Amino acid sequence: MNLSQKSKNFTESVIREMTRLSDKHGAINLSQGFPDFPASMELKELACKYIMADYNQYPVTFGEYELRSAIAKKYKECYGLDYDPDENITVTCGSTEAMLASLMAILNTGDEVILFEPFYENYWPDTIISGAIPRFVTLHQPDWHFDGVELTSSFNDNTKAIIINTPHNPTGKVFDREELSFIAELCNKYDVIAITDEVYEHIVYDGLFHIPIASLDNMIERTITISGFSKTFSVTGWRIGYALALEELTKGIRKFHDFMTVGAPTPFQLALADAVSLMKNYYKDLPGFYDKKRNLLLNGLNKIGFNSHPVRGSYYVMADFSDISQGMSDYEFAQMLIKDIGVASVPGTSFYNANKQEGSHMVRFCFCKKEETLQEALKRLKEL
């Protein structure tokens, strides 16, 4: 049986592969970004309330109105952005589906999509699945800046979209207003759509703040904003994400979403609609909650001999292992950590395509774990 050419152009998820290896060898999983601590009791009780009230059937395909209304209210209060719950918001099965549905909605075969690398590993396969051609622009270490000349030269008349992830996975970069304005000018010049993954929007450190590119001049009409609740509320298994866009773009997104998944889980949608309204202090307290974990892991890794790059947002760190093991590839090093040390990470090259050498001496760790989990992981890593 012959597979499609598309399926031959990318591999299965390396992140999920590392989780499987971690489970097999009983390692501490600092590879996949899911918490090992419980979600808030208030949120769990809300979900139970709707399950027990028999909200267990199909939702409205593009999202229960209560949740769409809560999202619209949040974006108005947090960012001053006006989105109509009926015309501009699509609730999806996680932000992962929101990204693919958005790309499918706007791309034709041969269109070009600009990706910053290192990139979250789904973006490149999503682009291929959509029939488009990826163009890669490097984020340069150690502060993960992009070169303006390099980015400008990647835009042309075939460019249809650019994917921006801020706060960024895997680097922890937070794009500032100057960088986003530079991108926005190019989008307006070349009539390009910005697809921005903002799922870590509430996890930002060091007095920085998240800026949606849709809030910049002339950008709301050419931006698809993607976010969700998995990371913010520590419920990655609930699979509730969303895409925000003006009406024409939303119509296309909803078509693909409808035939991909029909709808996201009903009781979790309703629980999160209540949570957005009832748990407003939650957003404010979240950076401090993760800041302690960030400092614990970064300080520990640096003492062991890793060179850990700055983390301004999200809950990941790219760690250079060159001073610990110069003879191993990133895959060899990651597998050694799992099998011999008992700690799982993700090989750096899995986040690259055009410039894999940039990640060949790095692994990604996540710190969305209990402090005792991180302490035990660091204890094991000291064996290096």
Image: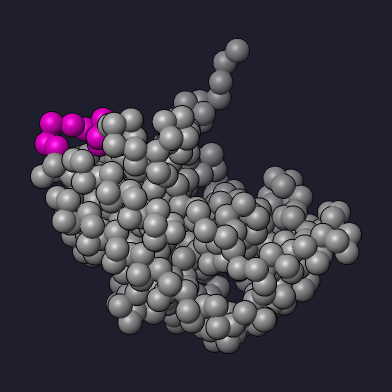
Q: Residue at the location (40% across, 68% down)?
A: 290
Q: Residue at the location (56% across, 20% down)?
A: 3
Image quadrant assignment for residue 355: top left
Asked whether residue 159 appears in the rendered view, the answer is no
Q: Is residue 333 magenta?
A: yes
From the viewer's perspective, tell me whether residue 211 is left or right of residue 70.
left
Q: Is residue 82 magenta?
A: no
Q: Where, quadrant-wise, is the N terminus in this rendering?
A: top right
Q: Residue at the location (57% across, 55% down)?
A: 236
Give 148 or 78, whichever is nearer the viewer. 78
Q: Which residues are magenta?
A: 325-335
Q: Where, quadrant-wise, is the C terminus in this rendering?
A: top left
Rendered location of residue 85, percent (x, y): 72, 75
Give 249 or 92, whichever is nearer the viewer. 92
Rendered location of residue 347, percent (x, y): 31, 40
Q: Residue at the location (44% across, 80% down)?
A: 216
- Identify the colour scheme used: one colour
Seen as rendered, the residue at the extreme top is 1
On screen, residue 304 above or below 337: below
From the viewer's perspective, tell me whether residue 260 is left or right of residue 243.
right
Asked whether residue 29 appears in the rendered view, the answer is yes
